[in-house]
């Protein structure tokens, strides 16, 4: 195995690979391709070929023209060859939480074998792992333990994929303990209409991304029941409070939750109808069964992680009444209207 080389941020030729050609992976690959040679990896060969030839991801981002310079492949060997051609390698994982462990396990074998044991890896998924309750960085730390020279971090923030793919303005946060990773992610994406801010608070950034999805479902439910704008504002604000409580109990800094990956993403996802979590909530509030809503394979990470979030919170003695109400609506047949009554009926207290 070759000796790991230190990352030299902002110097040399940076090569970017994005793994996972869903909506968000494709959008980030489009943003990176406007700045650097970038290759997108799709697990489906036909989809990879279609994206490469049509410059459009017809399944996940129909109607959005991708940069002509963006290639797409289903071959990890092609990804490694692409990265080896540069002086610096940035790998962005565009898979959901459920795919994170497998994606990292592949990299743990492939990167050292291809002389890329020094690359930087940034994940973008938002949620606690459904079966284990782990945050993404805990999944990554275990799966990539055999490649200690890899730099890792989480890329998050208020960012609807479609808008980013269209080249509209967006601000993101890269959180990592490694200055090299922070600078490499900024070098990879910051420019044009994309701003990337740096943070060291990995836990805070991840908790914000996970919990805002659950609160978006709650707001969707309230809006689906026509509970009004006051109710939505209350859910957003109290949702921010419970997100912050959980984050701080897990070791995050409270200030992080006032930033892009906390309040920023919470506002976007609870109010923007491009949000799948919000849309799932709207449908539930209007009486549609959850199984029907998810039947088309829609990614709604808040549904997948609500129970795991609650279990982690309970283990820490953290009160999360909105997350609890959402979880009971999703998985215990609590009627949406009864969930609202449950929240309203709680004892009065200090804010
Ligand atoms: N769509 C958006 O606007 C944003 C999404 N995110 C987060 O990014 C993650 C991915 O979301 P999207 O791209 O929107 O989802 P998506 O449903 O559009 O695409 C998911 C992609 O991952 C692949 N995939 C699914 N399960 C997998 C597995 N087990 N192993 C390997 N690959 C798998 C699918 O084939 C697909 O290419 C989620 O955690 C989401 O919360 C973050 C920011 C914005
Ligand atoms: O995370 C997102 C925006 O920042 C996307 O939200 P949804 O997953 O609810 O579509």
Image (tube, helix red, strand yellow):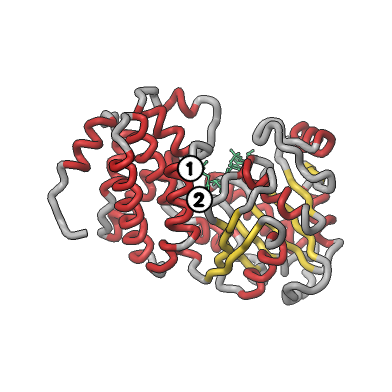
Query: Looking at this view, is 216 or 309 the one in front?
Result: 216
Image mark for residue 202: none
Where is residue 131? Give x, y as percent.
Answer: 43, 46
Residue at mark 1: 301
Tag count in the figure?
A: 2
Where is residue 308? Give x, y as percent.
Answer: 38, 48
**Residue 324 position by quadrant:** top left
Q: Secondary structure at mark 1?
A: helix
* In the image: residue 283, left or right of residue 146: left
Instruction: Name which of mark 1 and mark 2 comes first in the sequence.
Output: 2
- Could you classify mark 2 by the number of other residues whose Cα lies within 10 Å: few (under 14), some (14-19), or many (20 or more)? many
Residue 128 in view: no
Task: Tell me: is circle 1 under 8 Å from ligand 1.
Answer: yes
Q: Residue at x 63, y 55 (%)?
A: 104
Image mark for residue 126: 2
Q: What distance separates the C-alpha of mark 1 from that of mark 2?
A: 7 Å
Query: Looking at this view, is 189 or 316 the one in front?
Result: 189
**Residue 154 position by quadrant:** bottom right
């Amino acid at each position: 195995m070759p000796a790991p080389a230190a990352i030299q941020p902002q110097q040399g030729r940076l090569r970017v690979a994005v793994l996972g050609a869903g909506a968000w992976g494709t959008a980030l690959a489009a943003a990176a391709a406007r700045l650097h040679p970038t290759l997108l990896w799709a697990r489906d060969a036909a989809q990879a070929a279609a994206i490469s030839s049509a410059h459009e991801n017809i399944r996940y981002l129909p109607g959005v023209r991708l940069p002509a310079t963006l290639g797409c492949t289903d071959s990890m060997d092609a990804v490694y060859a692409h990265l080896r051609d540069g002086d610096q390698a940035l790998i962005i994982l565009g898979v959901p939480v459920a795919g994170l462990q497998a994606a990292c396990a592949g990299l743990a074998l492939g990167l050292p074998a291809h002389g890329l044991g020094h690359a930087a890896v940034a994940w973008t998924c938002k949620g606690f792992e459904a079966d284990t309750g782990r945050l993404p960085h805990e999944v990554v730390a275990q799966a990539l333990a055999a490649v200690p020279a890899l730099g890792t971090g989480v890329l998050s923030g208020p960012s609807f994929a479609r808008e980013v793919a269209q080249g509209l303005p967006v601000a993101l946060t890269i959180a990592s303990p490694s200055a090299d990773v922070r600078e490499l992610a900024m070098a990879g994406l910051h420019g044009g209409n994309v701003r990337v801010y740096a943070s060291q608070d990995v836990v805070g950034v991840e908790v914000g991304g996970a919990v805002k999805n659950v609160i978006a479902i709650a707001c969707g439910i309230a809006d689906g029941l026509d509970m009004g704008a006051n109710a939505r504002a209350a859910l957003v604000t109290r949702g921010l409070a419970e997100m912050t409580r959980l984050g701080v109990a897990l070791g995050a800094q409270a200030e992080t939750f006032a930033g892009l990956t906390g309040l920023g993403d919470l506002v976007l996802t609870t109010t923007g109808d491009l949000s799948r979590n919000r849309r799932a909530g709207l449908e539930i509030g209007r009486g549609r069964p959850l199984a029907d809503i998810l039947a088309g394979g829609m990614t709604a990470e808040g549904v997948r992680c609500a129970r795991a979030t609650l279990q982690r919170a309970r283990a820490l003695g953290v009160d999360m009444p909105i997350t609890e109400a959402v979880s009971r609506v999703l998985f215990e047949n609590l009627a949406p209207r009864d969930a609202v009554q449950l929240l309203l009926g709680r004892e009065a207290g200090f804010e």
